[in-house]
């Protein structure tokens, strides 16, 4: 697809893309100037509750969503916490309460895929979508929340907050802003972060769970992403040892794995590669190349793509497949399909250093 081709070139430019630099580089410099002016003249508004922002300088795909989930799980027990985000790809406008106390108040078309992912996958989820984040924060205050987590909030220079900036595991090859390279904000903006997690601050692990098991956990209000769970408690994929080794090799080859990363090895088979297609609409979908050995075919779509039922069913027919492998973000849009689905779940474990940084900020913010 054209959008995916553009996205790939923004990160890893082809010779043809570099040739376009004569046109794109000046536009990039103009964009950078506008962003710098915007930040220079911003007047941050202070709110009565602590605000943690999780952001990045590049186009999506740096792990904001799983980190927001991890932060919510870490602090919601102590502080009544609300996640606020724009709600990219939604068909509604304005401020909308997506979930309160774990009760989902709208559908995915109204909320957008990321907001619904929080609503479905977090116990006791509190989620608000709003283009105007300040309005969302005020609403959270009115509802009695004690802590706000802004998903993709770095650009909100008009809000006083604790800025966590994530570095992508594979940085754009060119240090330019859009439209020449993948930076939304110039690389030197990293100096404005309050905290940039090191690889040792975030340990990752992956699991694969069937939609049936997932739904039973959702209905039972179990914690879905509990790192203590054994993979045998989840539906596992029917993969040979050689395929698992190939998957691990993929991670190493792509330099997508930190020392703490791991893919949980299944103990029992439950789906066959020959029946499976990997379908996803996330930013930088090539991040999923580590999972290609688990499926006979794959179909990648632009970020936030609105799947059409007929389109997905046609893909299954064309590939002679009966089973879909997808991410949690995709699952919220595919779960009503009459097809077998397994979901790739990413769990993060935060270091004591990371948790202490956030706790110190919250304590200081509550004193002021």
Image: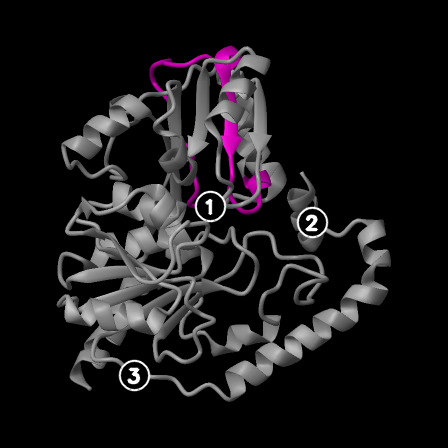
Question: Dot 1, how many residues are within 10 Å of its Cα: few (below 14), some (14-19), or many (20+)?
Answer: few
Query: Pointer 2: residues within 10 angstroms few (<14), some, or many (20+)?
Result: some
Residue with the mark numbered 2? 6
Q: CA distance from mark 3 to mark 2?
A: 38 Å
Was residue 177 drawn as part of the magenta stretch in this picture? no
Q: Disc 2 to disc 1, how far (Cα)?
A: 31 Å
48 and 226: which is toward the camera = 48
Say if 322 sits above or below 221 in the image. Answer: above
Q: Secondary structure at mark 1?
A: loop
The answer to whether 325 appears left or right of 222 in the picture is: right
| Stretch of the chain drawn in magenta | 258-287
Query: Which residue has dot 3 on it?
Result: 46
Nearer-N-terminus badge (2/1): 2
Q: Is residue 222 left or right of residue 6?
A: left
Residue assigned mark 1: 259
Residue 306: image location, x then y, percent: 48, 39
């Amino acid at each position: 697809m054209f959008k995916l081709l553009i996205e790939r070139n923004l990160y890893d430019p082809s010779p043809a893309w570099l040739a376009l630099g004569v046109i794109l580089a000046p536009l990039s410099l103009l964009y950078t100037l506008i962003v710098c002016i915007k930040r220079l003249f911003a007047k941050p508004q202070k709110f009565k509750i602590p605000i943690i922002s999780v952001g990045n300088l590049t186009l999506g795909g740096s792990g904001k969503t799983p980190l927001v989930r991890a932060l919510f799980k870490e602090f919601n027990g102590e502080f009544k916490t609300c996640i606020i985000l724009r709600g990219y790809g939604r068909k509604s406008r304005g401020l909308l309460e997506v979930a309160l106390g774990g009760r989902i108040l709208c559908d995915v078309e109204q909320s957008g895929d990321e907001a619904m992912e929080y609503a479905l996958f977090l116990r006791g989820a509190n989620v608000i979508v709003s283009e105007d984040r300040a309005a969302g924060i005020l609403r959270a205050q009115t509802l009695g929340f004690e802590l706000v987590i802004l998903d993709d909030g770095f650009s909100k220079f008009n809000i006083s907050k604790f800025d966590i900036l994530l570095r992508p595991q594979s940085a754009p090859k060119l240090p330019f802003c859009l439209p020449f390279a993948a930076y939304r904000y110039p690389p030197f903006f990293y100096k404005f972060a309050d905290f940039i997690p090191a690889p040792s601050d975030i340990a990752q692990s992956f699991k694969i769970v069937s939609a049936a098991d997932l739904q039973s956990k959702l209905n039972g209000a179990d914690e879905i992403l509990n790192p203590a769970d054994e993979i045998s408690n989840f539906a596992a994929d029917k993969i040979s040892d050689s395929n698992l080794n190939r998957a691990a090799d993929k991670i190493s080859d792509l330099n997508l794995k930190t020392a703490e990363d791991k893919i949980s090895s299944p103990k029992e088979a439950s789906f066959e590669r020959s029946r499976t297609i990997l379908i996803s609409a996330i930013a930088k979908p090539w991040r999923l190349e580590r999972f290609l050995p688990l499926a006979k075919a794959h179909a990648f779509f632009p970020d936030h793509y609105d799947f059409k039922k007929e389109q997905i069913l046609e893909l299954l027919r064309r590939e002679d497949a009966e089973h879909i492998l997808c991410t949690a973000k995709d699952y919220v849009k595919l779960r009503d399909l009459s097809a077998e689905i397994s979901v790739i779940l990413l769990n993060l474990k935060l270091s004591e250093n990371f948790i202490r940084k956030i706790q110190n900020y919250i304590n200081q913010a509550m004193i002021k």
